[in-house]
Amino acid sequence: MIAVLQRVTSSSVTVDGQVTGKIGPGFTVLLGIADSDTEEDLQWIAKKILGMRVFSDEEGKMNRDLADIGGEILLISQFTLLANTKKGNRPSFIEAARPEKAIPLYEKMIGVLSEGLGKPVATGIFGADMKVSIENDGPVTIVIDSQLKR
């Protein structure tokens, strides 16, 4: 499982002209689910997202997490994070989980993050053509990979 966290001042996602998710300060999380991912990967990634201390404290140091700032999460499914570009110029997505596996893990991630955050997580629509607007803060972008544990 791969998560790309972007610290944002605001973010939204639109599907077919309708806003499906919108947040203020917090994280926009792009989530790629691999065929090999398990509940353990999900829990590890969720814990990292919720505990990531990249928000400024009173001294301007990145020392606060989402809970400290009352931040929000916009979670977007993105299978293209699993792209394999080793051969040629057309990426292979063979390592990405098929929808029958990915959707339940994505929905479970929504629940785990919502519970940990203590409020609903905004989302896109799994498998839809989404337009994501992100106002990066910093910019601060962190990549978390459960397979590499980094």
Image (cartoon, helix red, strand yellow):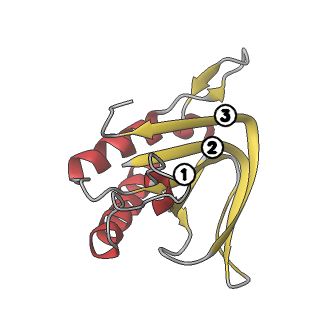
Mark 3, other Cα within 10 Å: few <14 / some 14–19 / many ≥20: few
Residue nearest the viewer, comparing 109 with 3:
3
The residue located at (61%, 76%) in the rendering is 129
- Looking at the image, the residue that sits furthest to the bottom is 16
The residue located at (51%, 38%) in the rendering is 143
Image spot of residue 35 (x, y percent) = 27, 59
With respect to residue 36, does 138 lie above or below?
A: above
The image quadrant where one finds the C terminus is: top left
The residue located at (31%, 63%) in the rendering is 105
Q: Residue 6, which numbered label? A: 2
With respect to residue 138, does 114 lie above or below?
A: below
Evaluate if marks 2 and 3 touch, with contact meaning CB atoms under 8 Å apart: yes
Residue 121 visible? no
Residue 27 visible? yes
Q: Amino acid at mark 1?
A: Val
Q: Alpha-carbon distance for marks 1 and 2? A: 6 Å
Residue that label 3 marks? 140
Mark 2 and mark 3 lie on one chain; the one further toward the N terminus is 2
Q: Alpha-carbon distance for marks 2 and 3? A: 6 Å
The residue located at (46%, 41%) in the rendering is 49
Residue that label 1 marks? 29
Label 3: element kind? strand
Mark 1, other Cα within 10 Å: few <14 / some 14–19 / many ≥20: many
